Image: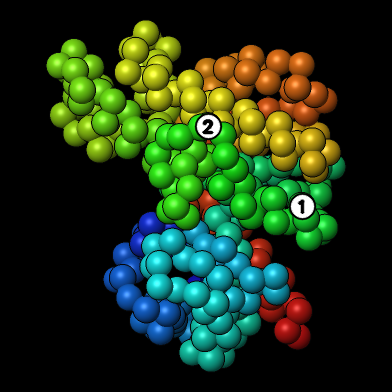
């Protein structure tokens, strides 16, 4: 890496995907669990080893950020984290500008970068460990009113079913615990384990490793007529349809992008969502696409350039 380049990092489930200003993708590094200082030290060490003269660092991570995008308000991987000034801590260690973004934001920006004519207002939902959302204005993050920003930030806690699994907040029936990719896999394993026939199907599909199943694979099983899979997929997609309906109406989105492991069954998911929405599908299009940490890291390079420009 030459002087004047930038680093883009994407931290997802403890793995740090890395991209450089030249678009080079490097092998992901594993971050050892620990408190904010330990994580900042590890990230700074990796950045320093790659190139100590880099002009800026962009970091996308699975976290809730403060309004000024400088602090981590909540980091689910480490429940004890609250209001951690991560950008400031990294800048103190590296001596370069640092900018933070959520995984949803990095994925959203990456998803429209290659589009020749992105919609004026695109709603992006990322369904992985949780369900998160962001709004784009063309190829930039939209500047939204506080009420809309709150709705986007809290979409995982939208109640989409009566009863159901308990959310980490203590309530039941929230989108996160019914419609996230992680919830679909966990719920399906529990449902399928209740019968020998369903268990056999699950193990056959996963080659004996049920925990390795993806949400997209479970949608495919449901499409093939597996009752256990359908019992999980239908309420999950109903929950996503309700969230899309609510946010698309609120934001006046012209395009909806659903990203994550459900993309393995993209056409089926899209068709079923459109059927569930019916007349409420409105004037917006729906696209189902994948998300990879490498994509987030690649976009984070641009985040680093913007941070360096603001600091200069």
User: Which residue has dot 2 on it?
Assistant: 161
Q: Which mark is residue 217?
A: none
Could you say which quadrant of the image residue 54 lies in?
Answer: bottom right
User: Which residue has dot 1 on it?
Assistant: 148
Q: Which residue is found at the position 40% from the left and 73% from the top?
A: 80
Residue 252 visible: yes
Q: Nearer the viewer, residue 232 or 69?
A: 232
Q: Nearer the viewer, residue 40 or 294?
A: 40
Tell me if residue 308 comes above or below residue 167 in the rendering: below
Tell me if mark 1 has few (under 14), some (14-19) or many (20+) residues whose alpha carbon lies within 10 angstroms of its own.
some
- Secondary structure at badge 2 equals loop
Q: Which residue is found at the position 39% from the left and 62% from the top?
A: 77
- Secondary structure at badge 1 equals helix
Tell me if residue 29 comes above or below residue 290 in the rendering: below
For this view, does 37 lie left or right of residue 112?
A: left
Image location (x, y in percent) of residue 291: 51, 43
Residue 107 visible: no
Describe the colour scheme in one phrase: rainbow
Label located before the other in sequence (2 or 1): 1
């Amino acid at each position: 890496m030459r002087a004047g380049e930038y680093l883009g990092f994407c931290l997802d489930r403890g793995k740090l995907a890395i991209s450089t200003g030249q678009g080079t993708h490097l092998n992901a590094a594993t971050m050892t669990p620990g408190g904010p200082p330990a994580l900042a030290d590890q990230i700074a060490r990796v950045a320093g080893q790659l190139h100590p003269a880099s002009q800026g660092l962009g970091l996308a991570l699975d976290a809730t950020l403060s309004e000024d995008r400088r602090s981590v308000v909540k980091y689910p991987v480490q429940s004890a984290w609250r209001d951690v000034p991560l950008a400031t801590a990294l800048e103190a260690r590296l001596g370069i500008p640092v900018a933070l973004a959520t995984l949803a934001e990095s994925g959203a920006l990456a998803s429209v970068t290659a589009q020749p004519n992105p919609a004026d207002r695109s709603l992006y939902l990322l369904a992985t460990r949780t369900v998160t959302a962001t709004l784009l204005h063309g190829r930039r993050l939209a500047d939204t009113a506080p009420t809309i920003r709150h709705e986007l930030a809290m979409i995982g806690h939208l109640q989409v079913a009566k009863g159901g699994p308990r959310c980490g907040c203590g309530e039941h029936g929230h989108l996160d615990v019914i419609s996230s990719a992680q919830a679909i896999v966990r719920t399906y394993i529990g449902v399928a384990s209740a019968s020998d026939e369903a268990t056999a199907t699950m193990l056959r599909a996963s080659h004996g490793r049920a925990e390795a199943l993806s949400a997209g694979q479970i949608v495919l099983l449901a499409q093939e007529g597996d009752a256990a899979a359908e019992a999980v997929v239908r309420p999950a997609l109903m929950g996503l349809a309700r969230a899309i309906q609510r946010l698309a109406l609120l934001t006046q989105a012209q395009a909806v992008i659903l990203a994550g492991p459900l993309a393995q069954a993209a056409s089926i998911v899209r068709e079923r969502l459109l059927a569930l929405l019916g007349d409420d599908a409105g004037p917006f299009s729906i696209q189902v696409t994948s998300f990879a940490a490498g994509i987030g890291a690649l976009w984070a390079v641009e985040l680093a350039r913007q941070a360096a420009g603001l600091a200069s």
